Amino acid sequence: MRLIDNVVRSFKVAKVFRENTDRINSIDFSQNGETLISSSDDESIVIYDCERGTHKRTLQSKKYGVDLIRYTHAPNTAIHSSTKVDDNVRYLSLHDNKYIRYYQGHTKKVVSLCMSPVDDTFMSSSLDKTIRIWDLRSPNCQGVMHLPGNRSVVNYDPEGLIFAVGLNSELVKLYDLKSFDK
C-alpha cells in the first residue's frame, strides 16, 4: 500500500488514551508488538496492552524525569534518558519500577537513544557532541565518538552491523560498527 494523501485520510483512529497531563516525548513498541511504552514531560512512563487496547500500567520517574524511552530485548525492561538531576541514561525494571543500572558519561542532554536489534548494546548521542556505545550488562561506556556538530541522531541498521549518524540536520554518515573506536 502506498501512503498517498487519500489513503492516509481514510485511516480511522482505533483507540485514544489520555493518561498523560503533559507532552508525550517518546513512544516505543516491544519487540513482539504486544505492548507500547511512552514517556512524557509529566515524568510518567505509561505501558499499553496493544492486543487488548488497554492502559496496562503507569510508572513515575519524578526524581530523574524521563525522555527517549526504549524497550530492551526483554519486555519487562527499558532504557531512557534523564531530564533532571544529570544527563545519565537509566536502565529500568518495569516489573518493580526500580533502576537496574545507570550509564554515566554524557555531560549534556541526551538527544538520541537506540537499542541494537541483535544484542544488549545501545547507542546514545548528546548535545555534548559525542555518541556513546553501551552494553546493558556494564555501567562503563564501550566506545565514544566525538562529533563536530552540536546535535546528532543515531540508529542501527536492522542487522546491527552498521549505524547511521545524522549531523547538524545536513548529513547522514554510515559507519561499520566493528570499527567504532578506530
Image: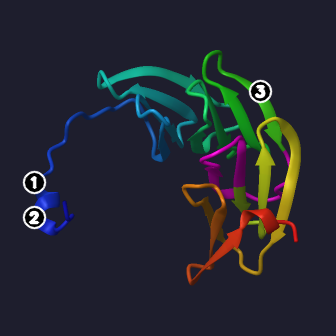
Question: What amino acid does circle 1 point to?
Answer: Ser
The image shows residue 63 at horizontal and vertical percentages of 71, 32
Q: Which residue in the structure is indicated by mark 2?
A: 6
In the rendered image, the vertical position of residue 91 relative to residue 83, given as above or below: above
Secondary structure under the numbered disc 1 in the rendered image: helix
What is the CA distance from the residue labelled 2 to the residue labelled 3? 47 Å
Which residue is more in the foreground, 133 or 40? 133
> In the image, which residues are magenta?
104-123
In the rendered image, the vertical position of residue 92 relative to residue 153, given as above or below: above
Q: Is residue 56 magenta?
A: no
What is the CA distance from the residue labelled 1 to the residue labelled 2? 6 Å
Q: Which residue in the structure is indicated by mark 1?
A: 10
Label 2: how many Cα within 10 Å (few below 14, some 14–19, many 20+): few
Quarter-of-image position of residue 182: bottom right
Q: Does residue 63 appear in this view?
A: no
Q: Are marks 1 and 2 in contact (CB under 8 Å)?
A: yes
Question: What amino acid does circle 3 point to?
Answer: Ile
Q: Are marks 1 and 3 in contact (CB under 8 Å)?
A: no
Q: Which residue in the structure is indicated by mark 3?
A: 100
Q: Is 85 on the left-hand or right-hand side of 54?
A: right
Residue drawn at the location 56% of the way across and 79% of the way down: 169
Question: What amino acid does circle 2 point to?
Answer: Asn
Of the image marks 2 and 3, the number of the one nearer the N terminus: 2
Residue drawn at the location 82% of the way across and 56% of the way down: 106
Of the image marks 1 and 3, the number of the one nearer the N terminus: 1
